[in-house]
Image (spheres, coloured by chain):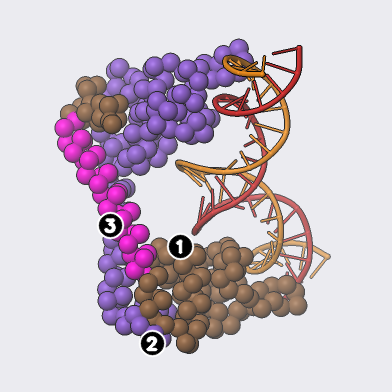
Chain colours: A brown, B purple, C orange, D red
DNA sequence: CTTGACCTTCCCACTGTAGCAAGCCCCATC
DNA sequence: GATGGGGCTTGCTACAGTGGGAAGGTCAAG
């Protein structure tokens, strides 16, 4: 199966499939003409990668999750730890963003938002600690 | 004032000050020896930039906010729109991250997390839509 | 044989920050 | 006057992840 069809079947772009290969997440057989050749099992791997990326796992985590996925003797504890560490990172970032959003919303609420120049948002950016 | 002291006074790194200058956010006088020379007003600009970046405004927004800040005839509505658009972007990203965190937490809650290989997290990554 | 769709590799862009290197400048100390 | 250390200059590299595109090989249909 060509990379184009593998892309269609997996939901990834051909570009990204090549990138993930270069990053060592998978390897592809090559036909005599140099084209990459994908089997069903490869599609499953590619879909796994897409799903992990959809949950914002960094490529390094995806690499580890793939290794565990392929290892029949894995300990589910290892998978769980990767996932929960990632959850903590996600929640920390999300909370930081929402704190920023809250304080900006608060400032914007006190901004006239008309043609006058006075604006507590600019005041705050000027004076913030 | 040297860039080193400007960095200390503004809370930015000298590296970043040069970068923001290259990005056109500010310009610095030059001494005959080629050194950048900063005045008090420049420190205020640098602090403004730092505060805006602390609220995760992208550099493009910082550029616009700086232009409005410098414009005595600005309309506060323009500032408010930039801020609220950014708030919306922040909240959208934060919500997306928390949705990911929620679903991963849910999966992790059903994972034994011991030495057995069975793991709903991997199952989900394999089967996700 | 030509056309068009596919494939290959390689380079560049983005965002924002940091590190390193070569070379110049200034000041203090000897 | 020379030397050393710290600051300054520029420019390259890298990160993570994705997209764009160029230049070229390959294959099938017409």
Q: Is residue A95 magenta?
A: yes
- Decide: few, some or many residues near mark 3? Use Cα within 10 Å; few <14, some 14-19, many ≥20: some
Residue A71 in the image: state x and y as whole percent.
50, 84
- Decide: few, some or many residues near mark 1? Use Cα within 10 Å; few <14, some 14-19, many ≥20: few
Label 3 resides on the chain identified as: B
Label annotation for residue A58: 1
Tags 3 and 1 in contact by the CB under 8 Å rule?
no
Residue A75 in the image: state x and y as whole percent.
42, 82
Residue A62 in the image: state x and y as whole percent.
47, 69
Q: Residue at x 30, y 26 (%)?
A: A126
Quarter of the image for the C terminus of chain A: give it: top left
Label annotation for residue B95: 3
Q: Residue at x 34, y 68 (%)?
A: A84
Q: State how many labels appear.
A: 3
Q: CA distance from mark 2 to mark 1?
A: 25 Å
Q: CA distance from mark 2 to mark 3?
A: 33 Å
Q: Are marks 2 and 1 on the same chain?
A: no
Quarter of the image for the N terminus of chain A: give it: bottom right
Q: Is residue B109 visible?
A: yes
Label 1 resides on the chain identified as: A
């Amino acid at each position: 199966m060509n990379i184009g069809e593998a892309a269609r079947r997996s939901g990834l772009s051909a570009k990204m499939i090549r990138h993930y290969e270069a990053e060592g997440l998978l390897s592809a057989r090559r036909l005599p003409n140099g084209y990459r050749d994908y089997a069903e099992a490869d599609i499953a791997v590619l879909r796994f990668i897409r799903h992990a990326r959809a949950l914002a796992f960094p490529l390094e985590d995806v690499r580890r999750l793939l290794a565990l996925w392929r290892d029949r003797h894995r300990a589910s504890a290892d998978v769980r730890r990767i996932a929960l560490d990632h959850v903590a990172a996600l929640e920390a970032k999300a909370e930081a963003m929402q704190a920023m959003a809250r304080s900006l919303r608060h400032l914007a609420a006190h901004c006239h938002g008309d043609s006058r120049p006075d604006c507590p948002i600019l005041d705050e950016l000027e004076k913030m600690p």
